[in-house]
Image (cartoon, helix red, strand yellow):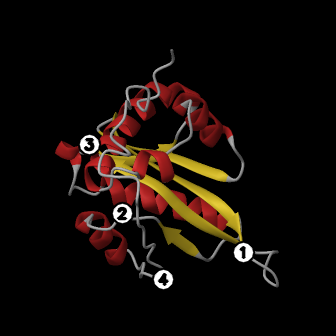
Amino acid sequence: MRVTARYATIDDLPELLRMYAELSAEQSAIRSIWPFADGLDEPVEASLTSLVREDGAAAVVGEIDGVTVGFLIAIEEPLLKPMSDRRIGVVRFIFTDHEARGVGVGAAMLDAVMERLEERGIDLFDARVSPGHRLAKNFFESNGFKARSITMHRSDAGPDAFNGDRSNRSGASS
């Protein structure tokens, strides 16, 4: 078994859309607000295309024996003054197909994106992890990350506020 990671291209868009839909479903089960607050803006296909092409982002796919089984997207964000001349690399999304977890795909993708960000002069890194997603938290901690912030949330909108029609969250065009 050969695990590799490479930078995503527009040709990877169908697989990125498939995996993003799975990531969104997984995250929504943990926090129903995720697709509306932490996910990609609609249309998802356009958002993914922009991230693959954007200079201030790094999109990586993970493969096993040449088959795409994961993706990672990181973005660069400026720090506040007086350090606004520096940027922080933020891992926004990481996903590996369930049957491909635990064999090094995530680590290969993280290594590739960290290398790219370090080449751009970035030496500060964050990773967004949903509360309750113990596997993701453990993964990032095993790669040297430590919690520096926890977002607290309250909703007075009722239990069904974020359970509306999400049929287009997969990135399908209508």
N-term mark: 3 or 2: 3
Q: Which residue is mark 1?
A: 79
N-term mark: 4 or 1: 1
Looking at the image, how many numbered discs can be counted on the residues?
4
- Frontmost of labels 1 and 3 is 1
Type of amino acid at the residue the image marks with label 3: Asp
Residue that appears at 69% across and 44% down: 54
Q: Which residue is mark 3?
A: 97
Mark 4 burial class by Cα count in 10 Å: few <14, some 14-19, many 20+ = few
Q: Which mark is residue 130?
A: 2
- Vertical order, 102 against 124 (above or below): above
Q: Position of residue 157 (x, y in %)?
A: 40, 53
Disc 3 to disc 2, how far (Cα)?
Answer: 18 Å
| Secondary structure at numbered mark 4 | loop
Q: Is residue 128 visible to us here? A: yes
Residue that appears at 75% across and 75% down: 86
**Pointer 3 with pointer 2, Cβ within 8 A:** no
**Pointer 2 with pointer 1, Cβ within 8 A:** no
Disc 4 to disc 2, how far (Cα)?
Answer: 14 Å
- Vertical order, 71 against 136 (above or below): above
- Vertical order, 86 against 32 (above or below): below
Type of amino acid at the residue the image marks with label 2: Ser
N-term mark: 2 or 1: 1
Residue 34 left/right relative to 69: right
Q: Which mark is residue 148?
A: 4
Q: Position of residue 112 (x, y in %)?
A: 49, 57
Disc 4 to disc 1, how far (Cα)?
Answer: 15 Å
